[in-house]
Image (tube, helix red, strand yellow):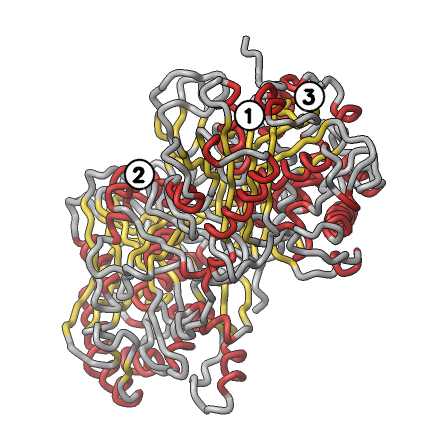
């Protein structure tokens, strides 16, 4: 049987990072919010678990790789009844005849999917994307402890990081839960969580995985063990003999606990610094545990860039804006926000795949445009003409015109929009996102998969691509 | 080769309400008010009108769909009545339809009426509605100031202009209109504003500040047109005729093809070129006595002066600052106060502009009256610079 390996990884955080000290300062009067240091990643209004997963997936797949199965893992899907994996396929412009799987319900859904893909020796290449944007309530310490982000893993054949051994354990520990009736987290007593998670779940599963791999705890170069509460890894290491640093702690400090994406994000960071021959311990926790022992056998696509996800961004110190972005503060945006955003299902059926994939058209003369049209927009063309697909999502664009619009409603004003020109000829009016310093005419922009509109009246959302500055500023440590 | 409409149609009556916050009036009140003034001016009976066109741009606000609101409000006999809509060119579009009908000989006397009740939307700016269409899946819907503000950055980039200089020229555009609007009893805003106030106003859409933007108003305007012969039969001696009405609409070139630099409006150039040809005007800088252009935002007026060929490319900034378009300048612009001081009840605006030119040609403009008025130009720019419909009309006297 051909050895399956981790071939590529991608780690993605939204641009904004809340400095937890800013939140602590705002909440000091109340004594709420917890006292964790560091930062948590904060999704923009137009980001959700899917968009975060898509951005991570784009980083994980090398050009030319053929993906046969796509898995989307999240506990915070905006839809209960609409496949995120299916939209992910369109966003990545993968063939429609592809196996898709949506997994959730547990923070370890991402690692569970990874384990399944590594054990699926006969399968085609699998792409696992995990994304989380979990709703929380202000005052709850988890609002500051958790973060928003995405991570992705590409599993295929050949060198990379291979599975040496594994173990799984099913255990219904109610350390924290969210439900339809209570969509924000309710957490059990911390000492109970720590004691039970360590003794009953993590330690026995990790020991079993190490034994299955024939690897001693001290041989592990880097561990990735998510901590439901602080101090879990310290206790696990003491009990198992692990000496390795825990990459999951770095993720928690820089971006927050990313739920289903957390262990995969930590894996990205660990592979970014690993050398061939290094052995890694990856644990997924939630409703039990999956523990994987991996060995690095060669380069992993995307691993070297993973560190950028935590080292680039913009600090958010405005606690009120944070509350608004997280949906914790229901501001009255006035009558201009009352616009209808209804989406026609039949319109989406006709055009949705081109929208999610950012697919324009190229006519016989080589002119590209977006969207496609029966009669090309190129001057002088008078007849209908067939167009071949042209994907614009991975192109760099140039700003032709732009403004910061303060009259138009935006959940995070001002609303930036303008014309973007692509080198191959296409141009279109685009919304901008992740704006830092004021962009100018002529600046280069990259494309980001984002929420286009939210129909709050009917609980529906659509996705499209937005233009973002080419690079993010480097965060100070 | 089409012969055009020059001098084939005369405007024999016009009416215009005050523009403003008409909390106490519905659209039917405004329509009747504008109509009554026009009918009295024309000296005709209502029964002589054989066809009518209603211009209203925003079907969701007050007036409603179809032409029935006009037929109901004016209690028109069962003549053909049609509603037209072409964004901010709607008022001119209504006039174009009426003029074409008379020029074609399809009817002897036609009515064009434009109306909009924007204040009933309950907020500033134009309403924004999406309707579940394909464009909603990808196209950002910025506000009107956001759409037009984009001219500024592209203009500055193309001509190497400092943002501060451009901002100063834009402020002069608004300052000038407020100077003129203060003299107009029908204007919504009748207060002169200082340059300092304009430059210091809060931003609406970079680089447009509050005073770079026109207001939101309610209003109606009306024109009655007929043939010159019939006009003379009505006892009219000093006839104002339509020299040209031209329209140009985007086909996607600006926003979907690679050539446009965003610093000018192609449709204005197209419509103006055709209108000058139709009117027989070879040199608009020498021929035009005044202009009423679509100053929805100060940058729009500045760029429009180049698009109309009244300033060389890249020179409008300096011409504006030199006072070329002030009331006493070489080509006065917005003598009535413009959209800046009238506001922009979309369906009425084009006809409101024609009302000022008509009044100037007949020497009825009071304190604003120009000394030698032979040709007046009106210009509307609907949509956005990257996706526009432009209308240019030229009115003059029958030689």
Q: Secondary structure at mark 2?
A: helix
Q: Secondary structure at mark 1?
A: strand
Residue at horizontal 20%, vertical 78%?
A: A201
x and y percentages locating residue A430 in the rendered image: 48, 44
| Observer-nearest of A338 and A449 | A338
Residue A468 — which label?
A: none
In the displayed structure image, the side of residue B368 where residue A63 appears, left or right:
left
Q: Which residue is mark 1?
A: B226
Q: CA distance from mark 2 to mark 3?
A: 54 Å
Q: Is residue B203 visible?
A: yes
Find out whether the residues at labels 2 and 1 contact each other: C-beta distance under 8 Å: no
- Quadrant housing the C terminus of chain B: top right
Q: Which residue is mark 3?
A: B398
- Mark 2 is surrounded, within 10 Å at the Cα level, by few (under 14), some (14 to 19) or many (20 or more) other residues, namely some
Residue that sits furthest to the top in the current view:
B1
Find out whether the residues at labels 2 and 3 contact each other: C-beta distance under 8 Å: no
x and y percentages locating residue A157 in the rendered image: 25, 44
Residue at horizontal 58%, vertical 48%?
A: B344
Q: Which residue is mark 2?
A: A351
| Observer-nearest of B314 and B390 | B390
Find out whether the residues at labels 3 and 1 contact each other: C-beta distance under 8 Å: no
| Observer-nearest of B323 and B20 | B20
x and y percentages locating residue B362 in the rendered image: 72, 33
């Amino acid at each position: 049987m051909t050895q399956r390996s981790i071939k590529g990884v991608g780690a993605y955080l939204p641009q904004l990072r809340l400095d937890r000290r800013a939140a602590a300062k705002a909440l000091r009067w109340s004594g709420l919010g917890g006292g964790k240091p560091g930062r948590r990643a904060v999704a923009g209004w137009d980001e959700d678990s899917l968009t975060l997963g898509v951005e991570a997936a784009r980083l994980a797949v090398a050009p030319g790789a053929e993906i046969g199965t796509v898995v989307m893992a999240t506990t915070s899907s905006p839809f209960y009844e609409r496949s995120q994996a299916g939209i992910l396929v369109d966003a990545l412009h993968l063939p429609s005849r592809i196996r898709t799987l949506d997994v959730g319900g547990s923070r370890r859904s991402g690692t569970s999917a990874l384990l399944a893909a590594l054990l699926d020796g006969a399968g085609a290449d699998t792409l696992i994307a995990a994304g989380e944007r979990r709703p929380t309530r202000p005052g709850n310490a988890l609002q500051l402890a958790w973060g928003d982000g995405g991570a992705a893993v590409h599993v295929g054949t050949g060198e990379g990081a291979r599975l040496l051994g594994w173990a799984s354990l099913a255990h219904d520990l109610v350390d924290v839960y969210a439900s339809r009736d209570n969509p924000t987290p309710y957490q059990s007593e911390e000492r109970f969580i720590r004691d039970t998670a360590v003794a009953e779940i993590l330690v026995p599963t990790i020991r079993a995985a190490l034994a299955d791999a024939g690897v001693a705890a001290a041989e592990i170069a880097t561990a990735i063990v998510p901590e439901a509460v602080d101090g879990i890894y310290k206790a696990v290491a003491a009990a198992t003999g692990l000496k390795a640093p825990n990459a999951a702690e770095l993720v928690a400090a820089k971006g927050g606990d990313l739920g289903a994406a957390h262990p995969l994000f930590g894996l990205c960071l660990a592979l970014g610094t690993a050398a061939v021959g290094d052995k890694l311990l990856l644990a997924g926790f939630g409703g039990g545990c999956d523990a994987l022992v991996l060995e690095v056998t060669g380069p992993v696509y995307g691993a070297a860039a993973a560190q950028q996800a935590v080292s680039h961004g913009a600090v958010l110190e405005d606690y009120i804006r944070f509350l608004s972005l997280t949906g914790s503060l229901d501001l009255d945006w006035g009558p201009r926000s009352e616009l209808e955003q209804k989406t026609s299902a039949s319109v989406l059926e006709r055009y949705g795949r081109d929208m999610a994939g950012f697919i324009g058209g190229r006519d016989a003369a080589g002119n590209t445009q977006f969207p496609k049209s029966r009669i090309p927009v190129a001057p002088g063309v008078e007849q209908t003409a067939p167009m071949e697909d042209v994907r614009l999502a991975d192109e760099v664009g140039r700003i032709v015109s732009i403004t910061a619009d303060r009259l138009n409603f935006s959940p995070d004003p001002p609303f930036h929009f303008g014309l973007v020109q692509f080198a191959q000829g296409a141009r279109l009016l685009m919304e901008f996102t992740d704006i830092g310093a004021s962009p100018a005419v002529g600046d280069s922009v990259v494309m980001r998969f984002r929420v286009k509109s939210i129909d709050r009246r009917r609980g529906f959302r659509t996705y499209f691509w937005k233009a973002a500055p080419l690079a993010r500023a480097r965060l100070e440590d | 080769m089409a012969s055009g409409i020059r001098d084939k149609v005369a405007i024999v009556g016009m009416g215009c309400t005050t523009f403003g916050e008409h909390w106490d009036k519905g659209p039917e009140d405004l329509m009747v008010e504008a109509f009554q003034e026009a009918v009295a001016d024309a000296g005709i009976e209502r029964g002589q009108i054989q066809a009518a066109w209603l211009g209203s741009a925003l079907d969701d606000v007050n007036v409603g769909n179809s032409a029935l609101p006009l037929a109901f409000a004016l209690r028109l006999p069962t003549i053909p009545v049609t509603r037209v809509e072409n964004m901010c060119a709607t008022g001119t579009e209504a006039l174009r339809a009426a003029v074409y009908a008379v020029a074609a000989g399809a009817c002897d006397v036609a009515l064009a009426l434009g109306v909009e009740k924007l204040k009933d939307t309950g907020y500033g700016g134009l309403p924004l509605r999406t309707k579940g269409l394909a464009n909603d899946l990808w196209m950002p819907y910025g506000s009107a100031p956001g759409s037009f503000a984009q001219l500024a950055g592209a203009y500055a980039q193309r001509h190497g202009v400092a943002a501060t200089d451009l901002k100063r020229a834009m402020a002069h555009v608004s300052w000038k209109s407020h100077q003129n609007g203060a003299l107009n009893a029908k204007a919504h805003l009748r207060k002169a504003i200082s340059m300092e106030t304009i430059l210091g106003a809060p931003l609406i859409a970079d680089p447009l500040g509050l005073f770079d933007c026109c207001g939101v108003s309610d209003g109606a305007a009306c024109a009655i047109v007929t043939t010159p012969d019939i006009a003379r039969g009505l006892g009219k001696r000093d006839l104002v005729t339509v020299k040209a009405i031209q329209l140009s609409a985007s086909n996607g070139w600006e926003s979907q093809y690679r050539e446009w630099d965003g610093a000018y409006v192609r449709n204005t150039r197209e419509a103006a070129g055709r209108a000058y040809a139709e009117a027989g005007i070879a040199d608009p800088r020498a021929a035009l006595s005044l202009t009423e252009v679509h100053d929805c935002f100060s940058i729009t007026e500045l760029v429009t002066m180049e698009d109309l060929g009244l300033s060389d490319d890249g020179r409008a900034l300096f011409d504006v600052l030199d006072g070329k378009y002030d009331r006493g300048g070489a080509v006065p612009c917005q003598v009535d106060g413009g959209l800046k001081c009238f506001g922009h009840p979309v369906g009425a605006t084009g006809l409101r502009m024609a009302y000022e030119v008509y009044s100037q040609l007949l020497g009825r403009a009071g304190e604003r009256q120009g000394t030698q008025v032979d040709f007046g130009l009106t210009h509307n720019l609907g949509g956005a610079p990257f996706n526009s419909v432009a209308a240019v009309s030229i009115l003059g006297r029958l030689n």
